[in-house]
Amino acid sequence: MERLPWLRRLFPFVLILALLAASQVMDNYLQYIVNLVLIYVIIGIGLNFLLGFAGQFAFAHAALMGIGAYTAALLTTRVGLSFWLALPLSGVVAAVIGAGAALPAMRMRRVYLALVTLAFAQLIIWVLINWNAVTLGTDGVDLRAPYLFGWRMRGDRNTFYIVLPVTVFLYWLARRVLESHVGRAFIAIRENEIVARSNGISVAWTKTLVFALSAFYAGIGGGLYALALGFIVPDSFGLGQLTLHFSIVVLGGMLSLYGAVIGAVVLTTLPEFLRDVQALQEIIYGLVLMVVILVMPQGIVGPLKRFGILPREVLARNWRRLERRG
Amino acid sequence: MTGRPVLLEARDVTIRFGGLVAVDSVSMAIVPGEVRGLIGPNGAGKTTFFNAISGLVPLSSGLIRLGGEDITALPAHRRAAAGLRRTFQSVQLLPQQTVLENVLIGLHTSFTAPGWRDRRGREAAAQAQVEHVLAFLGIAARILTPVNRLTFAEQRLTEIARAIVSRPRVLLLDEPAAGLSPTEVEGLGELLHRLRDEWDVTILLVEHVLSLVLNRSDRVTVLENGRLIAEGCPEEVANNRAVQVAYMGVE
């Protein structure tokens, strides 16, 4: 793909059209899986901002996805708000709470930050379970599907028509952010905070921003997840969910948006292939993850980029025009 | 040198770590267009003083002025925005990222500065500035090379490029000759004068390679045990009795 620039430019459009065409002949179950893949692309991009690009070992992503899911579900069913308003709000609410998780990140790093954010995540789950009056506890809540031009957007194919454009937009937005000074500030604080400060980057502001942005993606992903499932319980957003998020980023490849996409595809479809050996699922998950970390530290995108199958990703807008000069 | 306004001034700078006085009431005034060498035996407090100027170590007492303005209370990133940039003793770059990305990080404040609205124009202008500084330093062909595939000397130059791309007023160089071959050190010496004359940047240079400091500095300041023991043009300092004692143990 590196040698065929026209193919690279065309590829996203081809992919979107192919998905739309395929959805016309898919059965509901397959469509549901495709929806989940797209949702996990959003989730994976969100965690990649934080873990891959900014190097922050925070473990609240699944809980923040839960915040988004519950915000969307509760606002549509209990407040009676339209899903079209509830979805962006689920991102905003998660972003505000996620920015709060940036506070401990100002003082601690690595394993300490991981522990504090994990405790924070457990607290959120605890609130979802025990705040019965609002969240209905372990009974879970459902979500009222939106209307579009008088059509009730129910069912997996209609959900797909909502999830696809949101995913495409958030992917595009992520690319724009990463190819700007903001994305470069993220990688600067990952590598060395002292160097970042010496280059005029406010570490506190950058951390707040990346935690909020990451949580926004988790929140939107959660809102769409609630839409795709139609019904959610607090347990969906615990450690199992978090493991899946980390697996997507690590397996796909940190520091790469392609990585989030590939990780989401592999890890959302993998359990479907392992359906017959459900007891072995977790073990196979763990083995795959261990092998990838040992053999491909840059994830699946590592070798794909080396062999020119995936293009390079440089955090600078229109950087390719510089190639012609070298 | 007299009569010119002072660009970077440290006045009675003292830094204590617990009971240890690392820098003891050091004053220094650097004028625009100067290359100032800062030398001293190991443990003299050079690096601590240097970190205090760039804002990484807080002062116990004293003050620091840049262009007449008191910057003592400014955090490091605001000092960088005010035109005070530095390099590090051990090269500090993002190894997997390209030279372009690394040097663009040095232009962060040109994106956050208010006023200039056109975002697309900003990025293009920033990339043009990177091309310009890399050409100035002679590594233009490396713009899209990942830093971990550069030679060590090229990595040094990349770090200098990041420090000067924003056209700062003062450049702090922390042992830029460390790890370079004698030929490369010679090239670095010439670069110091080109930076001063062609890039219009004032330089404060901490260095262990004495020949580089004595050949290329306009003035030299000597620290020992946290105190300033000598200051003057290179010849004066080299012939200073206290300096000879501190360096060679000559009695």
Image (spheres, coloured by chain):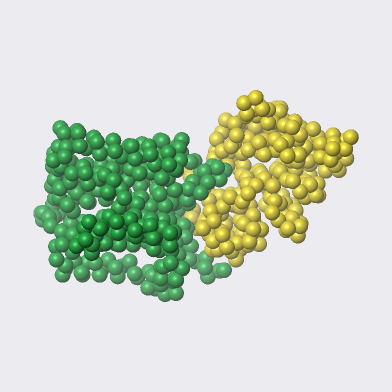
> Judging from the image, what is the letter of the chain drawn in yellow?
B
Tell me which corner region of the image, top left, top right, bottom left or bottom right, holds residue A298: bottom left
Q: Which residue: 69% across, 54% down? A: B179
Work out whether A295 lies above or below A44. Answer: below
Tell me which corner region of the image, top left, top right, bottom left or bottom right, holds residue B229: top right
Residue A105, percent from left and from top: 43, 38
Work out whether A185 lies above or below A4. Answer: above
Image label count: 0
Left or right, A236 with respect to B174, comes to: left
Q: Which residue: 84% across, 34% down? A: B242
The N terminus of chain B - image quarter: top right
Residue A324, percent from left and from top: 53, 70
Q: Which residue: 37% across, 59% down? A: A252
Q: Colour of chain A?
A: green
| Residue A49 in view here | yes
Q: Which residue: 54% across, 40% down? A: B77
Residue B187, percent from left and from top: 74, 58
Left or right, B65 with respect to A203, comes to: right
Outermost bottom residue: A4
Left or right, B142 with respect to A139, comes to: right
The C terminus of chain B - image quarter: top right
| Residue A264 in view here | no
Left or right, B244 with respect to A243, comes to: right
Residue B8, percent from left and from top: 68, 37
